[in-house]
Image (spheres, rainbow, N blue to C red):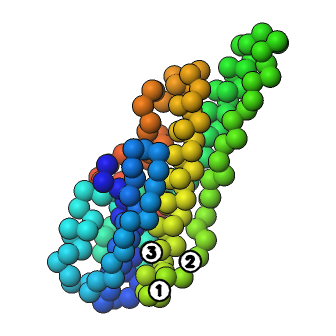
Amino acid sequence: MSGIAVVDQPVEDRVVVWHVSVGDGLESTMAGAWVLPADDDRIDGLIAGRLLVITEAAAGRFGVRADAAALAAAVRSEVDALDRAFTAHLATLPSSRRQLVRPRWPRVPTTATPVTAGDPVASGALTVARWVSDVLIAWGKTEGLRLARPFLLQHGGEAPRAYPPGWPQDGAATPGAAV
């Protein structure tokens, strides 16, 4: 997976692309930003092969793709499912072993916190990219907690998952709402 590109077009003559890289399914990093003329040939290369998260301002040009709010909801849903699986496992243990400590699941940010970029034109893309990055960091921590507990491996397999179930796994366009 080559990561995610957040695309915004806050003004008619500029496009902002902000990359969020995903490594080993367990970490997320803000990877780079470009503010380019709307007709710049480099835009296609910057978004090729990446999972696209498109802001509302850019949806007219780029279409609706992956949804950051849906990512947060998918991570939250998976955390809830894993917590239920933990509770179910605990119930199968003899009472002498029920002191097993519940995982401290990470907080999953459900909305974006506005961020101001050095170039104000890039602030919308930065806000969404930071939100996606924060959600993916929470996802990485969730996967780490899942993989550390053998009884949770049946819920998702033995390998780390780059994204939660129910969210696109590749760069294909997907239905969703622009953010």
Query: Residue 125 has which mark?
Result: 3
Q: Where is mark 2, residue-wise? A: 115
Identify which amino acid the numbered label 3 is placed on: Ala
Q: Of the residues tagged 1 and 2, which is closer to the observer? A: 1
Q: On screen, 155 above or below 160?
A: above
x, y percentage for residue 60?
A: 34, 75
What is the distance, in whole Å, between disc 3 and disc 1 at their CAs? 12 Å
Element type at marker 2? Answer: loop
Q: Residue at x 57, y 45 (%)?
A: 141
Element type at marker 1? Answer: loop
Q: Of the residues tagged 3 and 1, which is closer to the observer? A: 1
Residue 111 visible, this orientation = yes
Among numbered discs 2 and 3, the one appearing first in the sequence:
2
Identify which amino acid the numbered label 2 is placed on: Val
Query: Residue 118 has which mark?
Result: 1
The 10 Å Cα crowd at callout 2, few under 14, some 14 to 19, many 20 or more, is some
x, y percentage for residue 125?
A: 44, 74
